[in-house]
Amino acid sequence: MNRPTFLEGALVALIASLGASILFAALGGVAASGGVLRLLIPGIGLAYVLYLLGRSAERVGRITTLAAWVLVAGAAWGLGLPLVLYLLVHVGLIWLVRSLYFHSSLLAAGVDLGLSGLGLAAAVWAALYTGSVLLSVWCFFLVQALFVAIPPRLPGRASRPDSDADTEDRFGCAERAADAALRKLSSVR
């Protein structure tokens, strides 16, 4: 399965923002806005995580990932965290799932973390200046759609060998060097 595209991410952002604003308006008359947000945040987060898992080529650990997500989200809700911390937990969960399923290096995951922070900043900015749930969710997920521009593996200073042949060759070289060093030590005495 191919990685998602930015256009696909923009469509996800549109669907998430429309769904969130409709639900917020519908539930706003029934409960306080803080309570409605505490329901919308994990609901939208879970929907996005399911989308990510569905688009990932990685098949291992999906059930465990979902179980861990539900456990952490439930604990955040049960602890009654302040809304800001509650939101940070859910953004962190989205980042973690995306890092596990779409990135193969710590550097790529770190860039994605920065992108998550930028998306959160855009959402907070939209909320403060417009007061619109639709625009806040749209801004957050539109920035998140940019994660497809992050290569799965960003080159680091030291790269690990990618094949078993390289590993065996490097091991053989190290073994020969160790044998030579031992011969030198034994011949000195």
Image (spheres, rainbow, N blue to C red):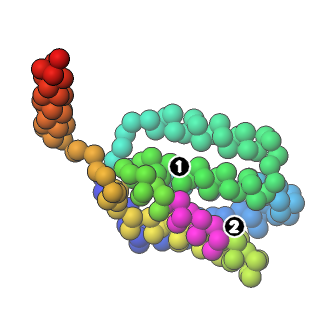
Under tag 1, what secondary structure?
A: helix
* Horizontal side of residue 139 vs 131, given as left or right: left
What residue did someone put label 2 on? Answer: 22
* Horizontal side of residue 189 vs 43, given as left or right: left
User: Whole-percent x and y of residue 28?
Assistant: 82, 64
* On screen, residue 145 above or below 103: below
Answer whether labels 1 and 2 touch (C-beta < 8 Å): no
User: Whole-percent x and y of residue 9?
Assistant: 46, 67
Q: Evaluate whether residue 179 shows in this view.
A: no
Q: Give amino acid for label 1.
A: Leu
Res 96 label: 1
User: Whole-percent x and y of residue 31?
Assistant: 86, 57
Q: Quadrant of the C terminus?
A: top left
Q: Between residue 23 and residue 71, name the one nearer to us.
A: 71
Q: Residue at x 73, y 53 (%)?
A: 86
In the image, residue 185 lies in the stretch drawn in magenta: no
* Horizontal side of residue 154 vs 48, given as left or right: left
Provide the residue span drawn in magenta.
112-122
* Circle nearer the N terminus (1, 2): 2
